Amino acid sequence: MKSLVCLQPQLSARAEALAAEFALQLSDEALLQQPGFHLCLDDSGLSLQQGAARPGKKRLQVQVDFVSGAVAHRRKFGGGQGQDIARAIGISAYKPTVIDATAGLGRDSFVLASLGCRVTAFERQPVIAALFQDGLERGLQDDECHDIIQRIELHHGSGHDLLQPQRFTADVVYLDPMFEHDEKARAQVKKDMQAFREVVGQDDDADDLLQRALACARCRVVVKRARKARPLADQPPTYSLTGKANRFDIYVNAKVAAPAE
Ligand SMILES: C[S@@+](CC[C@H](N)C(=O)[O-])C[C@H]1O[C@@H](n2cnc3c(N)ncnc32)[C@H](O)[C@@H]1O
């Protein structure tokens, strides 16, 4: 699924630019009669929409919204530096630089940037990267989000290629590959997550990221896992932080602190 439907003719130049940047194929509205999820552009931005929706039924839409979505709520009420992800990354008065090598729709990147970290984000799936990029561009127009979003730099590409110390290093490399999901778990996830899963599939090659991440991280690699999942690459972490839903496995290279002058 790499098609983009432009729903408003006045946005055709923007649609062409997105198609060129993320190697998407421009399609006409007839595509929306087909089942599955399709990328659509209208004046609210870019979204993933469910095709072949029943008449009178609202189409399911997935859009990146840093300004008023769930992630915006989390920015205001999410617990700041006390939340597990912040403790796992090692955020304190010193704000580590982070490579988010499996960025998805950028929720974790945004949380880390809102806590003061500079984030270099990699996303390889073109539809997901386009949604993230579009959310960043809309968020930049918002006064409250502007400075946070300026701390995020998105690269469309694979961590397997980009995680090379000659190209990118940071204090922390963060990995959050798709959890290995079974059919029972699939039935329990929210509809927007189902759409995301349908587009992304499983990240079966995630084990290969760990050594690459360790080579690019000055201080640590943090891996988000399902609570009871095996550690990535079956490599035991230095320690873990286990929360209600997830676990953060931390592989320590060095203490997180400002580099010596
Ligand atoms: C579980 S999601 C990440 C969710 C993300 N942490 C967030 O907060 O929105 C996993 C994402 O990692 C991406 N991914 C997996 N392996 C990757 C790789 N080697 N390079 C870049 N992206 C990758 C997938 O395409 C998917 O979008």
Image (cartoon, rainbow, N blue to C red):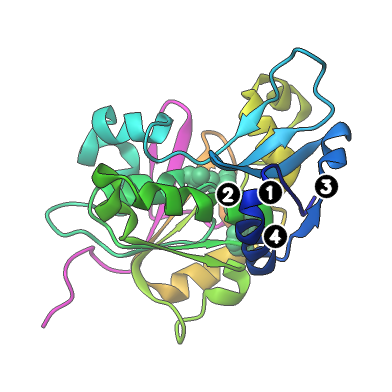
In this picture, residue 28 sits left or right of residue 242: right
Residue at image x 69%, y 62%? 19
Of residues 229 and 121, the one drawn nearer to the viewer in this rendering: 121
Residue type, numbered disc 1:
Pro
Decide which of tag 2 and tag 3 comes sooner along the chain.
3
Label number found at residue 9:
1
Q: Is residue 209 above or below residue 197?
A: below
Label number found at residue 205:
4
Residue at image x 56%, y 34%? 228
Is any part of residue 103 visible from this angle? no
Please, what secondary structure does the residue beneath circle 4 have? loop
Residue type, numbered disc 2:
Leu
Please, what secondary structure does the residue beneath circle 1 have? helix
Residue type, numbered disc 4:
Asp
Is any part of residue 89 visible from this angle? yes
Judge depth for marks 3 and 4 and give the one in front. Answer: 3
How dense is the environment of label 4, judged by Cα within 10 Å: few (below 14), some, or many (20 and up)? Answer: few
The Cα–Cα distance between marks 2 and 3, rounded to whole angstroms, is 19 Å
Decide which of tag 4 and tag 2 comes sooner along the chain.
2
The Cα–Cα distance between marks 1 and 2, rounded to whole angstroms, is 20 Å
Decide which of tag 3 and tag 4 comes sooner along the chain.
3
Q: Which residue is mark 2?
A: 131
List x then y, in percent, for residue 149: 34, 54
How dense is the environment of label 3, judged by Cα within 10 Å: few (below 14), some, or many (20 and up)? Answer: few
Q: Which residue is mark 3?
A: 28
The Cα–Cα distance between marks 3 and 4, rounded to whole angstroms, is 34 Å
Q: Are marks 1 and 2 in contact (CB under 8 Å)?
A: no
Q: Is residue 248 magenta?
A: yes
Residue type, numbered disc 3:
Asp
Quarter of the picture containing the C terminus is bottom left
Query: In this picture, which residue range is highlighted in magenta?
Result: 235-261
